[in-house]
Image: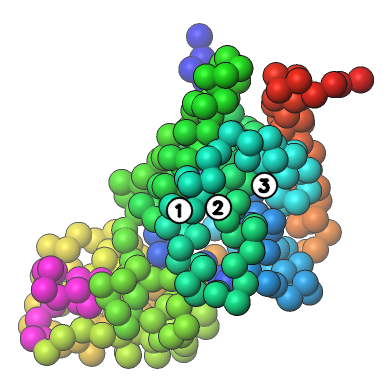
C-alpha cells in the first residue's frame, strides 16, 4: 500500500524580493515536492495589512509567481495560486475568528512589532492577520508548515484554533505542525550580523536580494561588516565573518572546516570577493529563468488560474464541512 504524502502549505507575501536567507530555504523546494504534497499560496490578502500601492501589488504578485517557479516550484507537482483567488480563505477566517480569544491576538509578536513600526496604521487586519493565516493552513488539512522560528507562534495559534474547533465539533481539522528546516542556513544581515537578514531592512547594504545585479551583489559584500582580527574562522565572537562563511557554504556546499582551510592566510578582501562570486554564480540561473518566465505573461496567468481551481476544489470541501458543523443553512 502506497504511503500517503504529508501535505505542506506555504504562504508567501508578494512584497519585496526574496533575500539570500530565503534562497537558503527555497533551494530545497524541488526535493520537498518529491517528498510531500505541496501547496504554495501568494498571500496578497495578508500584504494589505500595510498600505500598498495597487498597481505595484498587482505587478509584484505576478513577479512573485515567476520567482517561485524559477526557484524550483513545479506547477505540475505542486499547487501554486493567489490567495484572493480562493474566497474560502476569507470565509473560513471569519468562522475561525469566533474560536480565537482576543487576548491571543494581542500577544502575537508580529502584531506588536508592526504596530510599533506603523503606529499611524494599526488596523483591524493587523490584529486578525494570524486568524487568516490559520485559515490558510487549516483549509487544506495541512500536516506541516515550513516556517522559521519567527513564524512558529502563528502555527501554534493555528494548532490551538484547530484543537478548540475539533473539541466542540469533532475531528474536522488536521492539527498542523511547524516544519523547521534542518538544512537551511540562517543568513544574517551584512551590516548587523547579529540580526537576521530581512527584505524589509531599510539599509540596502544589509540585504542581498535574489534579483540583485552582479555588480550590486559585489558592492554589498565588499561593504559587509567583519572584524579587526583578519582571520577567516567561524566563532561566536566573529558574527560577521561567520555569516559570510555560512553564505559561502550555502552557495558552494562546503563546510566551515573546508572554508577555513581554503582561505587560510588570506585576507577579508579576497574572501569577500569569493563569497560575492559564489552568490552571483548560484543566483544566475534563477535570475535568467525568472526573466524568461516574466516575459511569458500568458503562461504565468495560466498557471495561477489552474492553481486557483485546484486549490478551490480542496478548500470548498473543507469549508462546506465547517459550515455544516457550525449550523449554517446550506441549500
Q: Give the label, 1 or 2, closer to the camera.
A: 1
Rate crowding at label 2 as few (under 14), some (14 to 19) or many (20 or more) other CA atoms within 10 Å. Answer: some
- Whether residue 245 can be seen here: yes
Residue at horizontal 78 percent and vertical 64 percent from the top: 296
Residue at horizontal 76 percent and vertical 57 percent from the top: 300
Q: Earlier in the sequence, mark 2 or mark 3?
A: 2
| Quarter of the rendering containing residue 235 | bottom left
Q: Earlier in the sequence, mark 1 or mark 3?
A: 3
Farthest top residue in view: 1
Q: Please tell me how many numbered marks the rendered image carries.
A: 3
Residue at horizontal 23 percent and vertical 90 percent from the top: 269
Which residue is identified by label 3? 80
Percent position of residue 184, x then y: 35, 54
Colouring scheme, one of rainbow, by chain, secondary structure, one colour = rainbow
> In this picture, is 270 found above or below 93?
below
Q: Which residues are magenta?
A: 229-244
SS at badge 1: loop
Q: Decide whether residue 231 is among the magenta residues.
A: yes
Which residue is identified by label 2? 72
Percent position of residue 29, x then y: 49, 48
Farthest right residue in view: 331
> In this picture, is 273 found above or below 82?
below
Percent position of residue 238, x then y: 14, 75
Measure the alpha-carbon separation of dots 1 and 2.
32 Å
Percent position of residue 41, x then y: 64, 49
Q: Decide whether residue 251 is among the magenta residues.
A: no
SS at badge 2: loop
Residue 108's disc number: 1
Residue 53's disc number: none
SS at badge 3: strand
Q: Is residue 99 left or right of residue 196?
A: right
Amino acid at each position: 500500500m502506497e504511503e500517503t504524502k504529508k501535505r505542506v502549505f506555504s504562504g508567501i507575501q508578494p512584497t519585496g524580493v526574496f533575500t539570500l536567507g530565503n534562497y537558503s530555504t527555497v533551494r530545497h523546494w524541488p526535493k520537498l515536492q518529491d517528498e510531500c504534497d505541496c501547496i504554495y499560496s501568494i498571500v496578497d490578502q495578508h500584504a494589505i495589512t500595510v498600505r500598498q500601492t495597487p498597481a505595484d501589488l498587482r505587478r509584484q504578485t505576478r513577479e512573485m509567481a515567476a520567482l517561485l517557479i524559477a526557484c524550483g516550484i513545479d506547477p505540475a507537482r505542486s499547487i501554486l495560486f493567489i490567495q484572493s483567488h480562493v474566497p474560502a480563505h476569507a470565509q473560513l477566517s471569519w468562522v475561525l475568528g469566533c474560536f480565537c480569544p482576543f487576548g491571543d491576538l494581542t500577544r502575537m509578536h508580529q502584531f506588536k512589532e508592526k504596530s510599533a513600526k506603523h503606529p499611524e496604521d494599526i488596523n483591524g487586519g493587523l490584529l486578525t492577520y494570524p486568524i487568516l493565516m490559520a485559515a490558510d493552513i487549516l483549509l487544506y488539512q495541512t500536516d506541516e508548515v515550513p516556517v522559521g522560528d519567527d513564524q512558529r507562534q502563528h502555527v501554534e495559534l493555528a494548532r490551538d484554533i484547530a484543537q478548540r474547533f475539533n473539541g466542540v465539533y469533532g475531528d474536522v481539522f488536521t492539527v498542523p505542525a511547524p516544519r523547521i528546516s534542518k538544512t537551511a542556513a540562517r543568513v544574517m544581515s551584512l551590516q548587523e550580523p547579529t540580526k537576521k537578514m530581512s527584505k524589509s531592512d531599510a539599509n540596502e547594504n544589509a540585504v542581498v536580494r535574489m534579483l540583485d545585479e552582479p555588480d550590486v551583489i559585489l558592492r554589498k559584500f565588499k561593504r559587509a561588516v567583519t572584524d579587526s582580527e583578519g582571520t577567516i574562522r567561524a566563532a561566536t565572537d566573529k558574527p560577521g565573518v561567520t555569516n559570510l562563511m555560512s553564505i559561502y557554504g550555502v552557495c558552494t556546499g562546503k563546510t566551515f572546516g573546508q572554508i577555513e582551510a581554503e582561505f587560510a592566510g588570506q585576507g577579508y578582501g579576497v574572501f569577500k570577493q569569493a563569497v560575492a562570486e559564489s552568490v552571483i554564480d548560484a543566483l544566475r540561473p534563477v535570475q535568467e529563468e525568472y526573466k524568461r518566465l516574466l516575459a511569458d505573461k500568458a503562461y504565468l496567468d495560466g498557471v495561477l488560474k489552474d492553481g486557483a481551481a485546484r486549490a478551490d476544489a480542496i478548500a470548498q470541501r473543507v469549508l462546506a464541512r465547517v459550515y455544516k458543523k457550525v449550523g449554517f443553512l446550506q441549500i
